[in-house]
Amino acid sequence: MLLNEPVFYAIKKEQLENIRNYKIYWIPAIFILLGILEPTTSYFLPQIIESSGGLPEGAVLEIPTPMPEQVLAAIVEQYQTIGIAVLILAYMGTIAGERKSGTATLLYVRPLSFRAYFLSKWTMASIISLVSVWLGLLAGYYYTFLFFGEVELIKFLQMVGTYSVWVLFIMALVLVASAISPNSGFAAAIAFATYLLIQLTDGLLGLNWTFSPGKIPQYGLEWLIGAPDSSGLWGAIGIAVLLILLLFAIGSWAAQRNKAKTKV
């Protein structure tokens, strides 16, 4: 049974570790900043350009006002680049770093299965990542409402819920990279390379492969302007869930296989 005393100990340890490393504070802060920055910058862009002195004398700057849905989409695009990079860099050493420092031995001496060990890591990383994304998108939603107009709350929540599945998948991917890597830097390289490969594959085959997990962010954004194709959406989510389960198996196996490499 996964939910036993060693598992709770492992999750508690992860919670304390994230507090000591201030991840529980600075990761949400970055996502909130990104969420606020996009609508604020878009709204004040004409004034910013004029104050920079980049226009000829007498020139009139006319920038079309974006739709609120476009502003929210821009926030998600920021999360797809800067946000994902932050999450990868924050959790690249979750398992590899513990082996190298020797702190993993605190868990290895307990009656904790490697499946539960990996699950505890993924659970805490996912909670912090999801809370960060939700807070950032809520902040962006509020400032978008102030500056550009209202987006239906139900559409916004559907978008956030769909995008959350993508975040869970990314966190599983990052932790597997950490489990199979000898150090944090190599884990980050694997995670970034795999993420770019997913994006490239979706870009090349996306029109013919509507079930691609890489389409989940796009399906999330389609809620803002109507509704995504239901078969494509649920197919992509279904494959993402299956891949998460597969990543659990790979991560648990890799953590056990590399146990002997832990520094004592």
Image (cartoon, rainbow, N blue to C red):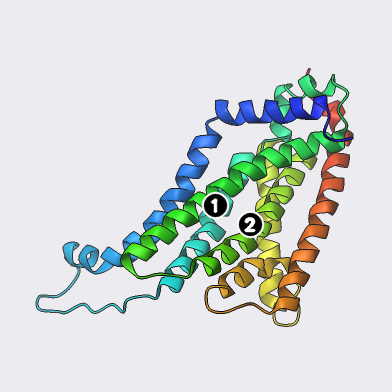
Is the residue marked by circle 1 packed among few (<14), some (14-19), or many (20+) residues within 10 Å?
Answer: many
Q: Is residue 181 left or right of residue 66?
A: right
Pick the front one: 101 or 132: 132
- Report the amino acid beneath label 2: Ser
Q: Percent x, y for residue 67?
A: 39, 75
Residue depicted at x 47% and y 62%? 75
C-alpha separation, residue under disc 1 versus residue under disc 2: 8 Å
- Report the amino acid beneath label 1: Val
Residue depicted at x 74% and y 65%? 237
Pick the front one: 53 or 239: 239
- The answer to which quarter of the image holds residue 206 is bottom right
Q: Percent x, y for residue 19?
A: 56, 28
Q: Percent x, y for residue 160?
A: 58, 61
Res. 143 mark:
none
Q: How many marks?
A: 2
Residue 58 lies, with reference to residue 133, above or below; the image says below
- The answer to which quarter of the image holds residue 126 is top right
Pointer 1 residue? 133
Pointer 2 residue? 164
Residue depicted at x 46% and y 66%? 72
Pick the front one: 156 or 33: 156
- The answer to which quarter of the image holds residue 23 is top right
Q: Are marks 1 and 2 in contact (CB under 8 Å)?
A: yes
Residue depicted at x 42% and y 68%? 71
Residue 20 lies, with reference to residue 62, above or below; the image says above
Is residue 184 at least partly visible in the picture?
yes
Q: Under tag 1, what secondary structure?
A: helix
Q: Earlier in the sequence, mark 1 or mark 2?
A: 1
